[in-house]
Amino acid sequence: MIDYLFRLPEHATGTLQSQIQEMMVDAITRGHLAPGATMPSGRKLAEQLKVARNTVVLAYQQLLDEGFIVARERSGFYVSEDVRAGFVHSPDTDSNIPSPPANKTDWASKLSFFPDAFPYLHKPQDWQRYPYPFVYGQFDKKLFPIADWRDCCREAAGIAAIHNWASDHVDRDSELLVEQVHSKLLPRRGIWAGRDEILITVGAQNALFLAAQLLLKSSDTIGMENPGYVDARNTFLTQTQRIELLDIDEQGMVIDERLANCQCVYTTPSHQFPTTYTMSKPRRLELLEQANKHNIIIIEDDYESEFNYGAEPIPALKSLDTEGRVIYVGSLSKTLAPGIRLGYMVAPREFIRQAKALRRIMLRHPPSNNQFIIAQFLKRGYHDALIRRTSHTLFHRSKIMKTLLDEHFPGGTQKPDFGGSSFWVRGPEGLDCRVLGEAAKQRGILIETGDTFFFPGTEKLNYFRLGFSSISIEQIKTGLPLLGELV
Amino acid sequence: MIDYLFRLPEHATGTLQSQIQEMMVDAITRGHLAPGATMPSGRKLAEQLKVARNTVVLAYQQLLDEGFIVARERSGFYVSEDVRAGFVHSPDTDSNIPSPPANKTDWASKLSFFPDAFPYLHKPQDWQRYPYPFVYGQFDKKLFPIADWRDCCREAAGIAAIHNWASDHVDRDSELLVEQVHSKLLPRRGIWAGRDEILITVGAQNALFLAAQLLLKSSDTIGMENPGYVDARNTFLTQTQRIELLDIDEQGMVIDERLANCQCVYTTPSHQFPTTYTMSKPRRLELLEQANKHNIIIIEDDYESEFNYGAEPIPALKSLDTEGRVIYVGSLSKTLAPGIRLGYMVAPREFIRQAKALRRIMLRHPPSNNQFIIAQFLKRGYHDALIRRTSHTLFHRSKIMKTLLDEHFPGGTQKPDFGGSSFWVRGPEGLDCRVLGEAAKQRGILIETGDTFFFPGTEKLNYFRLGFSSISIEQIKTGLPLLGELV
């Protein structure tokens, strides 16, 4: 007889064997099966759960190996007596968990600032459920290189690999990954950097945060593109309130007298965020000349430079820098997957040394197992192949997007010079993108309203962005005309 | 005939097939094999490399699949024409890489502070090569649960899992992991927290950094144990120079009038860092009472609380907190592996909301693939089993350490109340631990000198720490008497 009615969880993942194993671990660690208690017999449990007897036998073997249960000859399995050592349960049972203490502390008076109050682009968590998700920067299931990724994960789970990555690296990056960034990623952008000029970061956002902390005092002014990247702005706002807004034209960021007020400038020259304009070569040289003249540090966010199917690639600003005043930021979020959080920063070694020390007290280093896996991914050429495949796919989507946009929003878009994965659309005067966004959402179309990208108080309301990194050609063909009707 | 003399790299890892694949990708992306060039025939390459023909065939197939080479009927393989699209090489060849631009920027005048100047514990990178590494916080190859880890990695490489973790989570943690921290890790410490009171961090260090940024203005005072954890001190020093040093006695951190000066206090009650004293229950209640009275926020760093083989576990300070003023910090660095960088913070939801927003602009979230893997690791009971095995091993080492320490350093140590993985040793008056550390290193013995743990200007020189998390019983038995002689 079994005392408990065991049931496998409904939406469970994993094999039946691992589900049984987890169910029993749960019952043991939560105390439903106390130390010394008899385990249900394999045969009876199999009947109750309606699974094969062997499945239960294998799950029990695993529990035995892990020390959760013990076997006694001829009388079956028991919950191990020492299994709960180390557990400090509350006096109540789990089914009667006491509420956390009433919060009697006035946190508002205790906090030095409130990052929660910064505006940012809210993306619906469930975007995958919408029929027409013109979202930006998401990942496309169909493009993820599953076999290649598994190959690298297998390598990282080898004994020698584990010994390499599992230990405390304090502040060190994987030498293998730095070498690959040095020899495979940066040459694509015309950058030849020393290995001590490269720092691995938890995505590009982390590189921006490190740079902001090191470069900006509250008395400093930072120049930023407007419209621009909201979470870069938020990062800078944690350090200084002095922001100089720099305009955008067809050649990218406009260089004018406002630059002279800045100690630091943040720019997205490959593909201006969000307008997609590429900064022209003359504009780049002018920016560097002004930076040299006024002793300005430039933060170059080279996001999405990989998808340059549209034109000859323009080398990074960093590759034209003759005075070592450009801090270059890149990531694998747009090529491989944003969830992996792997970015890098390239800068003169004087700066990297400080950034590495700050990173040590901020988080030590990006997880070493991921550094190992991604080093393998780059080393085996999988990343190069992925860029080719993705560029090919984006190129086709982009052509169809462009044709349909010209038809349904005549004159409203400019073809990005540089490929990429989004269009910045100017709607008719008088359009309120926020109203459009809501109406579109009702009809299953997700767009990104343009207002959020402008600095508060400078919003233009008739712009919106359409991403096409996570939407199929069929969805584009039906969705865009629908959106056109709404406008 | 083969134009190039191909040679597999010397200390290479991976299969022969993957080595050949990498060698060829390298030759292609670096331009040694130009687009359109004929690939060496499989047979000839196999001869040159002295490998089986099939190994080359399989490597070429992979290159073909990835688009690096193309096949032409009856004439073999060629480097793909479009393989180098997107590469911006410098005008020079790779063997003649131009030096980075001379650094004409005065970085010292550009930086707002110099984290590189903060003192910290330097650990030799090559500690594994020393015969007697009494280092702390490192990982023991023999204890790493290789099979369990692989099991979870396999699960994370499944298609459904990848779709779950690869997308942009913006600021969200894995719900599965939060659930496991909630139901498997925190109950061990007597903490029952809501899911919105938990935040996953890139190791405990990241949790401390987030808390410091949110809580401390430059006019605030933080109380810290002295001696104490150096990189916590450094984190606080990035925010304020006002540090109140709190003494340690056998009951842990001393509560006296100095506490009233603090807006915030950082403490390691389970196992004071580095002295290993456990804060007594009366002392805990006194600390909380004073914190309530003076409106102080407490940061509880519960490091190493899992290895409580020595005594009945004392519940976390957080579990006794009636006013919601304790911020609890934990991690898997000491149990699983420091390289994985997985920690968590538990605090009232008002605070977690701000910490999550700050984390978003700092790094978004800890990598989602690791969150997924570790959720599986906890869910399947592997972490519980690992703690049991590790505690068992540490208990044995600890007993032998204690016996030998009493023999060779009579009166110099106290048995940690709470298990753990290190001893804090008081040497004879007049001993300079720095001299001892150097002399020991010459003889292959790594110890941690005690001076670094004290606030600059308050150093005591006759203390040192002996970690035993990464050293075998045999090494202990030979190494400790050797160290005794040196003292």
Image (cartoon, coloured by chain):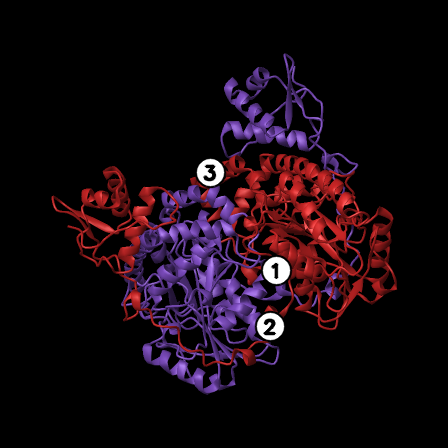
Chain colours: A red, B purple
Q: Are marks 2 and 1 on the same chain?
A: yes
**Chain letter of disc 3 in the image:** A
Q: Is residue A214 visible?
A: no
Q: Residue at x 53, y 68 (%)?
A: B353
> Which numbered dot is residue A122?
1
Identify the amino acid type marked 1: His
In the rendered view, does B304 fall on the left or right side of A120?
left
Label whose residue precedes the other's in the sequence (3 or 1): 1
Q: Position of residue B487 (x, y in %)?
A: 40, 63
Element at label 3: helix
| Left/right of residue B338 with respect to residue B242 in the rendered view | left
Q: Nearer the viewer, residue B440 or A93?
A: A93
Q: Is mark 2 in CB contact (under 8 Å) with mark 3?
A: no
Instruction: Please tell me how crowded label 3 is: few (under 14), some (14-19), or many (20+) other residues with Cα within 10 Å.
Output: some
Considering only order in the chain, which callout, 1 or 2, is on the residue closer to the N terminus? 2
Residue A266 drawn at (x, y percent): 74, 59
Pointer 3 and pointer 1 on the same chain: yes
Instruction: Name the residue: 62% across, 70% down.
Output: A117
Q: Do the residues indicated by labels 2 and 3 lie within the same chain of the protein?
A: yes
Q: Which mark is residue A114?
A: 2
Among the 4 quarters of the image, the one containing residue B34: top right
Q: Which residue is mark 3?
A: A154
Tag 3: amino acid: Arg
Callout 1: chain:
A
Q: Given this view, does label 2 or label 3 mark the residue nearer the observer?
A: 2
**Which of the pair B245/A40 is nearer the observer?**
A40
